[in-house]
Image: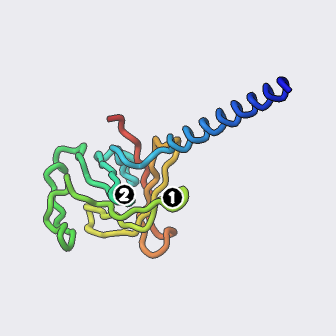
């Protein structure tokens, strides 16, 4: 009887260890919340910093800083609605993104250079170090993508 108790103890310990590892992996799932360096998809050059944050299960993005001093004082002259003529730095340009499987979608993204609002989706890659963001009209096939790099805070 003592031998079977020993085996039962090892099985219990192994199961507890497995469960602990699984819970730690689940808890360590990266979040898009944080500071990201945007990279212009046309030039490949860093453009600015944006902060993604979560509110009530949805993600939003705010332009945090421009890397070009002349862009830092820009206003969104081509924007419509409440964003018209507002400073670009500080503006919420990405709204209402919800996690759906491995992807975030259901919201929109504003291009402050043109004032155009696009449907949006994004996904994280490289264990949360990169964010692939796609803005599009209609279907995702008709759009463009940027890859943002997570900044260490």
What residue appears at the point 24 percent right and 48 percent down from the top-left corner? 64
Residue at mark 1: 103
Q: Residues within 10 Å of mark 2 (few under 14, many from 20)?
A: many
| Lower position in the chain sequence, tag 2 or tag 1 | 2
How many numbered marks appear?
2
Front residue (pair 1, 10):
1
Q: Quadrant of residue 109?
A: bottom left
Q: Residues within 10 Å of mark 1 (few under 14, many from 20)?
A: few
For the residues labelled 2 and 1, the Cα–Cα distance comes to: 12 Å
Regarding residue 144, the answer to whether it shows in the image is no
Residue at mark 2: 59
Q: Quadrant of residue 45?
A: top left
Residue 63 position in % (x across, y down): 25, 52
Residue 15 position in % (x across, y down): 70, 36
Front residue (pair 101, 118):
101
Question: Residue at the front extreme?
Answer: 1
What residue appears at the point 33 percent right and 43 percent down from the top-left corner? 35
């Amino acid at each position: 009887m003592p031998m079977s108790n020993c085996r039962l103890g090892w099985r219990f310990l192994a199961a507890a260890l497995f469960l602990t590892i699984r819970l730690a992996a689940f808890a360590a799932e990266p979040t898009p919340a944080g500071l990201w360096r945007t990279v212009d998809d046309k030039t490949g050059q860093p453009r600015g910093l944006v902060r993604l944050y979560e509110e009530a299960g949805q993600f939003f993005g705010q332009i945090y800083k421009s890397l070009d001093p002349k862009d830092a004082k820009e206003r969104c002259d081509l924007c419509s609605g409440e964003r018209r003529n507002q400073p670009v730095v500080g503006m919420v340009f990405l709204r209402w993104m919800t996690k759906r499987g491995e992807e975030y979608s259901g919201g929109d993204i504003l291009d402050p250079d043109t004032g155009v609002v696009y449907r949006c989706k994004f996904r994280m890659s490289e264990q949360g170090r990169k964010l692939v963001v796609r803005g599009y009209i209609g279907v995702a096939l008709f759009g463009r993508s940027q890859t943002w790099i997570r900044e260490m805070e």
